[in-house]
Image (cartoon, coloured by chain):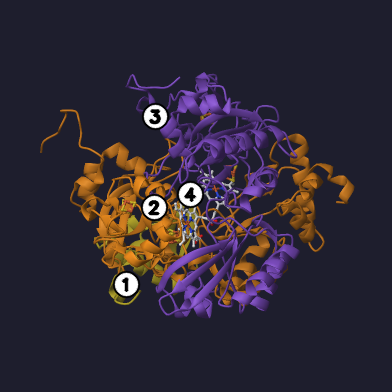
Chain colours: A orange, B yellow, C purple
Amino acid sequence: MADQDTPLINELEKGPWPSYVKEIKRAAKKNAAAKDLLGVQEQSFKDRITHWKHGGIVGVTGYGGGVIGRYVDMPEEFPNLEMFHTMRVNHPSGWFYTTEALRKVCDIWEKYGSGMTNFHGSTGDIILLGTSTQNLQPCFDELAENGFDLGGSGSALRTPSACVGPARCEYACIDTLDICNNLTHEFQDEMHRPRWPYKFKIKVSGCCNDGVAAIARADLSIIGTWKDTLRIDQEEVRNYVKNGFDIKGIVIDKCPTKALDWDEKKKELVLRAEDCVRCMHCINKMPKALRPGLDRGATLLIGAKAPIVKGAYLSWVLVPFMKMEPPYDEVKTLLRNIWEWWDENGRTRERVAELIERLGLKAFLKAVGIKPVPQMVYKPRANPYVFFE
Amino acid sequence: MTEGISEELKQKVLDYLGTTSKAKNRDVARAIEVDKALVDKAIAELAKEGKIEYLYLGTSYIQLKQQ
Amino acid sequence: MGKTDLGPPDYRTMLPKVIEKNYGKWKYHEILKPGVLKHVSETGDEVFTVRVGSPRLVSIDYIRDICDVADKYCDGHLRFTSRYNIELMTPKKENVEPIIAAVQKLGLPVGGTGNAISNVVHTQGWVHCHSAATDSSGLVKAIMDELYPYFISMKLPARLRVALACCINMCGAVHCSDIAIVGVHTKPPKVDNSKVTALCEIPTTLSSCPTGAIRKDPSNPKSLVVNDEKCMYCGNCYTVCPAMPLADSVGDGVAIYVGGKVSNARTAPMFSRLAIPYIPNNPPRWPEVVSAIKNIVEVYAKHAHPEERMGEWIERVGWESFFKLTGIPFTEYHIDDFTHAIDTYRTTTQFRW
Ligand code: HEM
Ligand code: HEM
Ligand code: SF4
Ligand code: SF4
Ligand code: SF4
Ligand code: SF4
């Protein structure tokens, strides 16, 4: 594929944002499949449709997931893409790496694959894009020799992910990395052997800024919070104000529950603790002066998903506050109970939230052994159609 | 993680699989009337020991390893 | 059989020394300038982070280039963020400028912090997926070339998150972004009945359709027909039945949704809502999509109060004002008629003109 053969995608080498086309071209110098990938990109730009299709299911021995089979629909023109499967490689929690580990992955992928990757997929895995069926097993074996394993796909637990948390964020109320790592290791079987109605995701954010979008994207969202009062360093508050920070406009007026006031006489920030809903806003704006409280744990929410099929959901509060200490037995038991109920009652391709909507939150709470509390709803029902037992 | 799975339980799983061509973990747990979490662990161990194998037909089944 | 069920590598083996030592002890942080963070620990230690934009779809040589920078200045450690940015961390302040110089030499931008437009969360598109109604990496490149000034600065009222999914399966789970771009098919699948029996399980295919639009052909039980009136082009059927492709070079394009957020700061998380129902694909640079997005960003930047996310601004001024200020026409497509539609109908006499 010479440069003049791809006039359309060449356009995307221009401009200030780094170009993926340049990246494919780099890989194409060393790899025939990457070279064909340029061609198929150009073809799609010309035809304005995709040129990928389904095909046989592929995988590695012992696993029912972690590999996505891909096939080009023009194999005569692009013979090196006849098979172009993806491998999902489970990232270390928080996406921290040593260069040694990363170079290892690169070397393995140079040997067995196209040399193209996604760092990372939207669920969090390292995505290795493009290899043949016969290379899957040796590639996997070599990854495993070097301490890497595949992530989830299909109707299974998907690769859990976590924000940077206590590793480099002062807001983290829970050890996001340890929780994510611990749960991922505990549930390897659930990840690698799909046996549920559909996928299930777990994401862990250290605070409700929610850097991994747990509340929008995870069937079980684990979000750090605190139960006592946020901590105020009045000296530092005064420093902000002294330096011209608009405490009234940016903090006081923006507090959703009007829990804050600025006492101009005493030069003190006043907090009505019972009104604070721990939204993080004031802390975000004055990180030197304000900090989360010390009685820390997580809010567990259930059910978020993208729109397919019956519309999108944000997660619903399930456990307003749970302490999060290793070995995290309480969460693990809860997860097992949820899965058992869903597996027993769910239809094919029905996410847990859809099942809850179909059978009712009441039935779900009963099945997993959780008592209703007002924190679960915005408001109680307005209709009189109660089924008494 | 896999401690405490008795040989007796694993044998029960193998015996049940001997009576059927393939089964889901849930079916096994129900048939031998043992808690599913324990059965899951027993099955994972048996797979590691190479006594059973997985079969993926839309969802995961297990069967006795074909000799 | 080789090793299985190892799980991911232990993150503890991947942490830089300064992070390991100060794990859980961070006290506060500052943004020194766009793309550069300073975190200070209770121990007095400091770590400087340079956040670097990445195109995500990259070659292994790119990863090796980044590793070279990390080896030189960051003791051989680095991390990625949930939005694909690369973060190079060092306890040494004097390393910050050399890191910036080194990544800029690789052609990579530094930014994405604070009230900026960070990297675009996105999906696979025409490089990899069978259901794509638009490309992903190409469209993101075209958009980010235009929004670049907002990546390397922090001049917006609040942070602005852009995400793109190349079909309504939404692998990127874009539905809670300030601006969400979604690939849409607008034509029903074309059934290839000569392949249905070989490739598809008929009951599964029938039940895959959320609107019940697929039936067996009464005259031939081995064939399928789609009721075009009922089809909402979701592609569910194609995912289970490869003989029902719905890609269409004329009908495919993108829709733009706005005003979503995931953070709980100030207001509860919100869904993104429909602003522009359809813009046809126009590769390689999708100029109509890019200028529509730029317009929305600029109107937001001009009218929102400080600290107001897109959705918070729109809720304050009302959707009627959003359509007026952006000049985007409001059409019948904007009125919801799906599962939770009624919640969106106005039940008050309060509104603006
Ligand atoms: C064969 C075509 C497809 C390709 C190439 C594809 C690719 C991907 C990739 C690479 C990821 C990220 C995975 C990771 O990081 O582990 C992903 C995530 C996802 N996919 Fe797909 N996918 C495809 C089909 C689908 C379908 C059919 C659906 C829905 C029915 C779907 C829904 C999702 C969702 C919701 C996510 C997760 C987003 C999140 O974590 O927030 N995808 N997909
Ligand atoms: C309104 C407040 C905030 C919102 C809505 C928010 C949202 C987000 C989002 C969407 C990301 C992904 C960004 C990316 O990868 O480029 C993110 C990442 C991150 N945010 Fe925030 N954030 C907020 C406040 C903060 C503050 C004040 C800090 C500083 C301590 C912070 C620290 C981080 C870090 C360290 C990441 C990278 C996390 C990761 O990818 O693992 N966030 N945040
Ligand atoms: S979600 Fe909270 S704890 Fe996690 S990185 Fe973001 S601000 Fe920090
Ligand atoms: S955390 Fe939110 S609710 Fe609580 S005082 Fe601060 S701004 Fe108000
Ligand atoms: S969003 Fe749709 S087209 Fe894009 S990768 Fe996901 S399933 Fe494929
Ligand atoms: S595209 Fe969706 S709505 Fe249309 S026939 Fe297929 S499954 Fe049904």
Question: Gap in Å between the C-alphas at discs 3 and 4?
Answer: 28 Å
Q: Position of residue C1 (x, y in %)?
A: 54, 72
Whether residue A191 is situated above or below residue C306 in the rendered picture: below
| Label 1: which secondary element | loop
Q: Which residue is mark 2?
A: A247
Q: Amino acid at mark 3?
A: Thr
| Label 2: which secondary element | helix
Give me the chain letter of mark 2.
Answer: A
Q: Which residue is mark 3?
A: C339
- Whether residue A215 is visible, yes or no, is yes
Question: Gap in Å between the C-alphas at discs 2 and 4?
Answer: 57 Å
Both on one chain, marks 3 and 1?
no
Q: Which residue is mark 4?
A: B58
**Location of residue A221 (image quadrant):** bottom left
Q: Which residue is mark 1?
A: A326
Question: Gap in Å between the C-alphas at discs 4 and 1?
Answer: 35 Å
Quick check: which quadrant has ligand 5?
Answer: top right
- Between label 4 and label 1, give the one nearer the viewer: 1
Which of C32 and A379 lies nearest the eye of the viewer?
C32
Earlier in the chain: of badge 1 and badge 2, it is: 2
Residue at 47% from the left image edge and 35% from the top image edge: C208
| Label 4: which secondary element | loop
Both on one chain, marks 4 and 1?
no
- Mark 3, other Cα within 10 Å: few <14 / some 14–19 / many ≥20: few
Question: Gap in Å between the C-alphas at discs 3 and 1?
Answer: 41 Å
Q: Decide: marks 2, 3 in contact (CB < 8 A)?
A: no
Q: Amino acid at mark 2?
A: Ile
Mark on residue C104?
A: none
- Mark 1, other Cα within 10 Å: few <14 / some 14–19 / many ≥20: few
Which of C350 and C80 lies nearest the eye of the viewer?
C350
